[in-house]
Image (cartoon, rainbow, N blue to C red):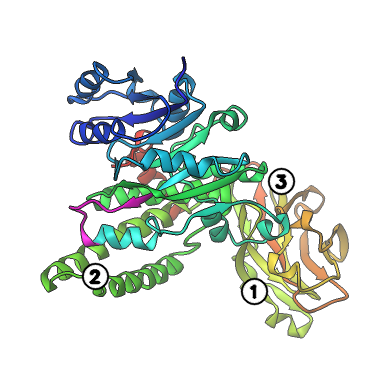
Amino acid sequence: MAPKLSIIIPALNEQANLGQCLKMVFSQKVDFEYEVLIVDSGSMDNTRVIADDFAKNHPLRLLELRPEEFSHGRTRQYGSEQAQGDYLVYLVADAIPADSQWLAELVASAEQDKKIAGSYSCQLPKENARLTEKIRMEKENLSRTEPRIAEINSWEEYLLMTPLERVKFCKFDDVSSLRKRAVLEKIPIPDCLWAEDLIWSKACLERGYKIAYAPKSRVYHSHQLNSGYLFRRGFLDQRAVAKHFGLIYYPSFWSALRGFFSSLSQEFQALQNQEAGLTEKFYSSLQTSILHLSEVSGRYLASINKTEKAEIDLINKLPSAHLFPKNAQERVIKTSFTLGDQWRKVIMANPPAMISYELRIVEPAELRFGIGIKPEAYKLRKAPIEFIVAINQEPIFKQTLKMELENFKGFKEFTIDLEKWRGKKTHLNLITASQEMKYGWAGWAEPKIFFKDKEPLFNVKHWLAQRIEDRLNLKNFRHI
C-alpha cells in the first residue's frame, strides 16, 4: 500500500546534518504512513552511508543525480516524480524538525481547505546561530507565530500591488514545505536556479489556489553566513524577482548606496535590542556591515542589463531635449516603475506634455519604446491618456490607454522603422495628451533608437557585470 506522504530531502555533502535531520523526521507522531527520499547529487563524504544506515530500519530510498543535473527546481521535481505519496513534503538536510508534531502540523495546515496548494513551516534559529543570522531571520519574519492563508480575492488589488508587496504576498519556503500532488501535476516545480518555491507559489495563486503558513510546524534552520555566499545569493535573488515580479531592488548605484546605509541602520538598531555582551555586539556590527554590503552589491550588479545594439537612449538625452508647454518642465521627469511583472526606466510625462529631440540618423535604425500608466493612477483618474509620436510635425504613432485593468498588466511595446528619415535632420516628438491633468502619470518606457548594422557599444558597467557573473559559477549554486 502506497504511503500517504513522501518527504523529499535534496542533499550534497550533508554528513554533519543528515543524521540528526533523519532522526527527527522518523520520530514524528502521525496516524499515517510516510516515506523518505534522499536525492543526492554527488556527495563526497558519508552522506550516502548515513542514508543507507537509516534505510535498513526505515522506509527510506536513496536517489542519485549527477552534480551537473542539479538545480533547486529540477531536483525537487525529480524527487516528486519518484515519490508515492499524495502529499509531498520538502525539507533541506540542515533543517531539523523542532519536535514530533512538525509533520502533523504541516499536513493539518494544508488540509484546512481543498483549495490550499501547499503550506510551509516556521523557521527558528539554531542554538549556535550568530546575532547577525538571528537579526536577518527576524527581519525576514521567518518565525512569526500567526497563521496565514494567501489567496487572490481581488485581481484588481493583486495587479496594483507594488512588486515588493507581491513578492511578500506570494511567500513560500522550501526549507520546509508541503505540496499536494494533485496540484503539482497541474503546476510542476519550475526548473530554475533559484526561487523555485516563490515562483511556484505565484503560479498557484494566479491559478486560484491558496498558500498556507503553518507556524506550529517548526524547524531549526540557520547558517553561518559568509560574504561570498551572500553576494551570489543576492545576485540570483535579484535575477529571479526581476524576471517574475518586476522587482528591482536598486535601479541605480546611488539607490544601492542609499539602500545599503538605510538597511544597515535598521540592522544596527535591531542589534542593540539583542541580549548580548558589548564585545559580541561589536563584532556582529562589523560582520553585519560586510555581509550586507556583499548582498547589496550582488543585487545591484544583477540588475544591470546588457545592451542589445548601438543605441541612442532618449532617457539619457532628456536634459538636452526641449519641453512644451513652458510648465512641462515640472511634469516631465526621469524615473521608473513596474507594470505587472515588467520593470522599466521611464520618462514620466504628465499630460499635456511634448518632449522634442533634434536628431540626425545616418544609419539604418528603428525607434523602440513602451507606453504605460503608473498603477497608482488607476483609482485616481478616469480620463484616458493618448500617446503620440511625431517626426517633423507628422504624427506617425497614436495609442490611447484607458483606465482599464488590462492596461496595468504590462507595458505596451512598439517599434517604428526610421528609414524614411535616414540622413535627414529630424525633430522627434513624444507627446502625451488628456482631458484630465491630475494624476496623469504617463510613462514612455525606455525609448531608444537602435542602429541595425552596428555592433553593441562598449559599456564598463555591462562588461563588469558580465565578467563577475561568468566567475560566480551560479549554475550549481546551493543553499549553505
**Residue in the picture at 26% in, 65% down:** 289
Q: Position of residue 221 (x, y in %)?
A: 29, 47
The earlier-in-sequence mark between 2 and 1 is 2
| Local SS, label 2 | loop
Residue type, numbered disc 3: Pro
Q: Which residue is mark 1?
A: 333
Q: Is residue 187 above or below residue 282?
A: above
The earlier-in-sequence mark between 2 and 3 is 2
Residue type, numbered disc 2: Gln
Query: Residue 240 in magenta?
Result: no
Q: Main secondary structure of the magenta part?
A: loop
Q: Which residue is mark 2?
A: 274
Q: Which residue is mark 3?
A: 364
| Local SS, label 3 | loop
**Residue in the picture at 84% in, 62% down:** 402
The earlier-in-sequence mark between 1 and 3 is 1
Nearer to the camera, 169 or 446: 169
Q: Position of residue 7 (x, y in %)?
A: 39, 29
Magenta part of the protein: which range? 122-131
Nearer to the camera, 450 or 340: 340
Residue type, numbered disc 1: Ile
Q: Position of residue 313 (x, y in %)?
A: 62, 59
